[in-house]
Amino acid sequence: MEAVALLSSAVSVIGVRLGAGTTQFKKTFATRNLRSNTEVPNRIRASNLTIDHISTLKKVGSKESRIGKQPIAVPSNVSITMEGQDFKVKGPLGEMSLTYPREVKLEKEESGSLRIRKALETRRANQMHGLFRTLTDNMIVGVSKGFDKKLQLVGVGYRAIVEGKDVVLNLGFSHPIRMAIPDGLQVKVEDSTRITVSGYDKSAIGQFAASIRKWRPPEPYKGKGVKYADEVIRRKEGKAGKKKK
C-alpha cells in the first residue's frame, strides 16, 4: 500500500511540473509571436515592395571629384588649341600638349576658363576626372609661370657644380657623378650645396630632382645625403653603447 501511495504522489508531482512547463512554453511562444507581429510593420521586405514603392526609391548617382569640377583659369599670355581629345597650350616659357582619354572631355566656357567634365559614368571616369584637371592646370601654370624644385646637399665634402649642360655631383664616392640636364630644364647651384631645378614641365622637374636625390638619399642618423629643401627627416638615435659599471 505504501509503495502504491508513493507512486501515485510521484505521478501527481510530475504532472504538476509538466503542466507548469507547458504553461510557461505557451506564455513564451505568445510573447514572441506578439513581438514579431508588432515589428513586422517597421520592416521593409523585398517581396512586399510594389511598383509604386520601387518607383519612389531614391537613385544615388556617382559624385563628381572636388578637384575635377573646379574651373581652370587661362591667363592672357597663354594661347590654347582644342581639337577633339587633343589639347595644346603655348606660353612665354614653352609649349605642351596632352591627349585626353574617352572618359573625360574638355570644354571652354564663355568666361574664357576651362572645365573638365566626365563623358561617361564609370569608375575609371571618376578617377580620370580629377587627374586630368590637375594635369591641365599644371600645363597652363607651367608655360606661364613655371615650377621649381630645390635640393640641399648635407655632408662633409658634398658639393655640386654645373658644367655646360651637365650637373656634376661629389657625394662621397670614388668618382664624381655627371648627369645630363634634360631639354626644357634649368639647373642652378648656389654655395655648392643648394640645387634648384626649374622649368615649365612639372613632372620632368620632379623626375630629374628625384634622380639626383636617389644617388645619396638622406640617412636617418646624421641626416647626411641629398634632400629636398622642405623635406623633414625623421632622425634615429644611434647606439649608446654599454655603460661602464
Image: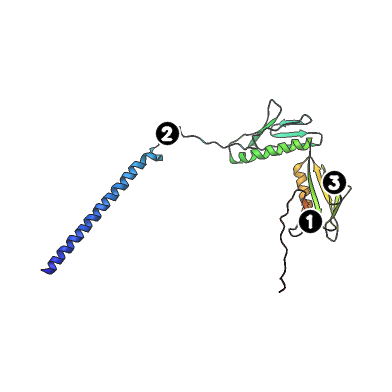
- Amino acid at pointer 1: Gly
Q: Residue furthest bottom?
A: 245
Mark 2 or 1, nearer chain start: 2
Which residue in the protein does label 1 denote?
225
Of circles 2 and 3, which is in front?
3
Q: Is residue 97 or residue 164 the one in the foreground?
A: 164
Q: Are marks 3 and 1 in contact (CB under 8 Å)?
A: no
Locate residue 138 relative to residue 41 in the image: left or right.
right
Where residue 188 is drawn, which disc sits there?
3
Quadrant of the image containing the N terminus: bottom left
Residue 85 location, quadrant? top right
Q: Residues within 10 Å of mark 1 (few under 14, many from 20)?
A: many
Quadrant of the image containing the C terminus: bottom right
Q: Residue at x 82, y 48 (%)?
A: 195
Coloured how?
Answer: rainbow
| Gap in angstroms between the C-alphas marked 3 and 1 | 19 Å
